[in-house]
Amino acid sequence: MIKKIVLGGGCFWGLQELLRKQPGVAKTSAGYAGGKVKNPTYENHEGHAEAVEIEYDTEKTSFKKLLDFFFQIHDPTTLNRQGNDRGTSYRSVIFYGSSEEKKEAKNFIDIVNKSGRWKHPVITTLEPLKKFYPAEEYHQDYLQKNPGGYTCHAIRFGSYL
């Protein structure tokens, strides 16, 4: 079965590039979520986080495994910042679609905090997914189109599981 998860952790280019390569990921889309602006654009997305919508095959991966990887590739302890990118657009956030996903995400944050891998506690927010807006075409698969493009994402740790 194909399910979706929406994650924000800094610039969507780097997140999309690393998440697309995970086993069981069928499709990724860069976009915006969590704000009040209708039909946001790169120039006008106040309140929205840059995010990635991930479609995944539940027979090949899971919500928990995707969260595990998400917490390996960005710093979940910095407020509204990843690398040189600053502002609420770059917040660390998990957009949940159900109470089960919210509970699983909260439990995973506890795992990350207990791991001791970060000097500071996780500040990743849990927000209900109201709507995901795909970004402009030039942002989709950006690092595929521009291999030397900017990213602050990298695999920092191994699995938390």
Image: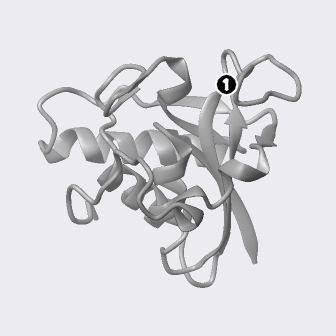
Q: Quadrant of the C terminus?
A: bottom left
Task: Pick whichever, 64 or 74, lies toward us.
Answer: 74
Whether residue 15 sits left or right of residue 39 in the image: it is left
Q: Amino acid at mark 1?
A: His
Q: Position of residue 126 (x, y in %)?
A: 55, 31
Is 87 drawn above or below residue 140 in the view shown?
A: above
Is 22 drawn above or below residue 60 in the view shown?
A: above
Q: Identify the residue at image location x=18%, y=26%.
A: 120
Q: Identify the residue at image location x=45%, y=53%.
A: 149
Quarter of image, res 1: bottom right
| Count of numbered badges drawn on the protein | 1
Whether residue 156 sits left or right of residue 101 in the image: it is left
Mark 1: give few (<14), some (14-19) or many (20+) Cα within 10 Å. many
Task: Pick whichever, 149 or 124, lies toward us.
Answer: 149
Whether residue 152 sits left or right of residue 156 in the image: it is right
Q: Position of residue 6 (x, y in %)?
A: 64, 48
Q: Position of residue 100 (x, y in %)?
A: 63, 48
Residue that sits furthest to the right in the current view? 38
Q: Which residue is mark 1?
A: 48
Q: Secondary structure at mark 1?
A: loop
Task: Pick whichever, 33 or 16, lies toward us.
Answer: 16
Q: Position of residue 86 (x, y in %)?
A: 42, 21
Q: Identify the residue at image location x=78%, y=41%.
A: 132
**What is the basis of the colouring in this image?**
one colour
Q: Identify the residue at image location x=31%, y=34%.
A: 83
Is 32 drawn above or below residue 148 in the view shown?
A: above
Is 126 drawn above or below residue 38 in the view shown?
A: below
